[in-house]
Amino acid sequence: MRFFRLTAAAAGVMAIAACGGEKQASKDVETATPAATEATAGAVAFAPVTGTMHEVQMTLVNGEYKYVPEEITVKVGDGIKYINVSGGPHDVSFDPATLTPEVRAQLGANMLETVAELRGKLLVQANEEYAVSFGKIAPGVYTAICTPHALMNMTQKITVVE
């Protein structure tokens, strides 16, 4: 019985230590290094922002939840910093079924602090931010979705160009 208690206690300590270690891997997309953020999706690694960091506001204005701007064009290597302005909580997510396997893997590697596949952390506080890198993302048109407000059509059209 005593051995069982010691084993259970040791397992609990290891579980707590393992959970605590995850927070160190969550870094801002502007400062993260590829070696420190190796993707879990195979050999695809995080691609940092090498271009412009665009800002997008997440708002509730006159009863409408929206990304401002609702349409944005970025270059491969740019990033988007989403800012919770009003009407939160908000997040930014992408539907994996709408992406090619290559884009899905790279975008997944470029989104730090996710709560599910291609779903960024929930922004609860005003002025809280979440950034997505479009490094190594193939040119194309992509749709960002605010999961809590998807039924209210809070989406954003992102066009990635060379």
Image (cartoon, grey):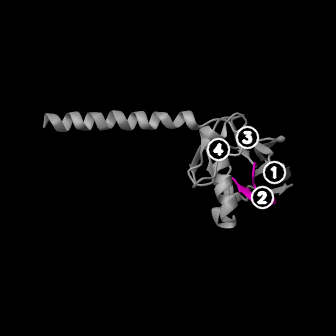
Helix, strand or loop status at disc 3: loop
Label 4 sits on residue: 89
Q: Marks 2/4: CA distance?
A: 30 Å
Q: Nearer the viewer, mark 3 or mark 2?
A: 2
Label 2 sits on residue: 138
Counting from the top left corner in percent of width and height, residue 44 is at 63, 52
Q: Marks 3/2: CA distance?
A: 32 Å
Please state which of residues 79 and 33 is positioned toward the viewer in this rendering.
Answer: 33
- Residue flagged by tag 2: what amino acid is it? Ala
Quarter residue 155 falls in:
bottom right
Label 1 sits on residue: 76
| Label 2 crowd (10 A; few <14 / some 14-19 / many >=20) | some
Q: Are marks 3 and 2 in contact (CB under 8 Å)?
A: no
Q: Marks 2/1: CA distance?
A: 7 Å
Q: Marks 4/1: CA distance?
A: 28 Å
Helix, strand or loop status at disc 1: loop
Q: Marks 1/3: CA distance?
A: 29 Å
Q: Are marks 1 and 3 in contact (CB under 8 Å)?
A: no
| Label 4 crowd (10 A; few <14 / some 14-19 / many >=20) | some
